[in-house]
Amino acid sequence: MFSQRTLTDLDKKLLQEKFPTTYEEQLKKVENGYPIQYLLGDVPFFNVQIKVNENVLIPRFETEYLVEKILNRVETKQNLKCLDLCTGSGCIAIAMAKDTNFSCTGIDISTPALKVAKENAKLNNVVVEFKQLDILKEEIEEEYDIIVANPPYIGFQEPVDNSTRYEPQIALFAEENGLIFYRKILESIKNKPKLIAFEIGENEGIAIKNLAIQRFPNASISIEKDLAGKIRYLFIEPN
């Protein structure tokens, strides 16, 4: 699913600047698989800078492209209510709220992750409401124009890159072969949003499309690829 970031000369320079006395030690940690993003403490994401630590998943390029696709699909950027489920670091909600008039809410089960998300909203001077909620047990009470989710979607038997062992496992793995969050999210949506956008595993497209058809039988549904040519996104436009 995820590959370890290639260490660049700029990475090494930043690492040396942050850890001038323990640079070799930190470099060895990275070479042994520890994510450099956690050592540096933040990452650029779309139009914002996102603080990261071991309480949140590291934002990926694939998720940046999801944000771009969502904004390109929405004709008007005015006064839309957006919900970001399994928000983690808050990167999606914050990036979507940054240069729009969207009213964004981010939801997550993790208290430590929500703390990071709130810090990121403040860091980027963006107003996003963050709430704690277990989407597997609780309903989405409000109505939203856009619902986006990059939930845990790796089945417990799927192989992953060794570097992900340092990331919160609750943000990576899911039951029902990685499908449980998509099913629960679709079941809990009460209204017909303008757009539902999912980041998905590359082998999950058809299964999630079938779940979407059950909930929104007349919807326009598209499965799309990331910049590497892998199936990565599913968009639902209920009619």
Image (cartoon, grey):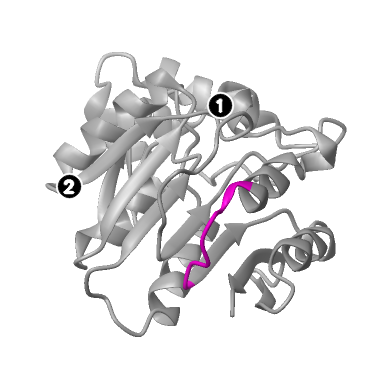
Residue at image mark 2: 127
- Residue 141, picture quadrant: top left
Magenta segment: does it hold 44? Answer: no
In the image, taking residue 73 as reference, residue 5 lies left or right, namely right
Label 1 near label 2: C-beta < 8 Å?
no
Give neighbour class at mark 1: few <14, some 14-19, many 20+ (Cα, 10 Å).
some
Magenta segment: does it hold 191? Answer: yes
- Residue 80, picture quadrant: bottom left
On the question of residue 88 being in view, the answer is no
Give neighbour class at mark 2: few <14, some 14-19, many 20+ (Cα, 10 Å).
some
Q: Which mark is residue 108?
A: none
- Sequence-wise first label, 2 or 1: 2
**Vertical arrangement, residue 175 with respect to residue 3, above or below:** above
Q: Secondary structure at mark 1?
A: loop
Looking at the rendered structure, the kind of residue marked 1 is Glu
Looking at the rendered structure, the kind of residue marked 2 is Val
**What residue occupies the far right of the structure in this picture?**
157
Discs 2/1, front: 2
Quadrant of the drawing holding the C terminus: bottom right
Q: Secondary structure at mark 2?
A: loop
Q: Which mark is residue 167?
A: 1
Count of numbered circles in the view: 2
On the question of residue 2 being in view, the answer is yes
Residue, x 56% and y 29% (percent of image)?
Answer: 31
Residue, x 27% and y 21% (percent of image)?
Answer: 19
Q: Nearer the viewer, residue 136 or 234?
A: 136
What stretch of residues is rendered in magenta? Answer: 188-194
Distance from disc 2 to disc 1, alpha carbons, whole Å, reads 26 Å
Residue, x 33% and y 14% (percent of image)?
Answer: 22
In the image, taking residue 224 as reference, residue 105 lies left or right, namely left
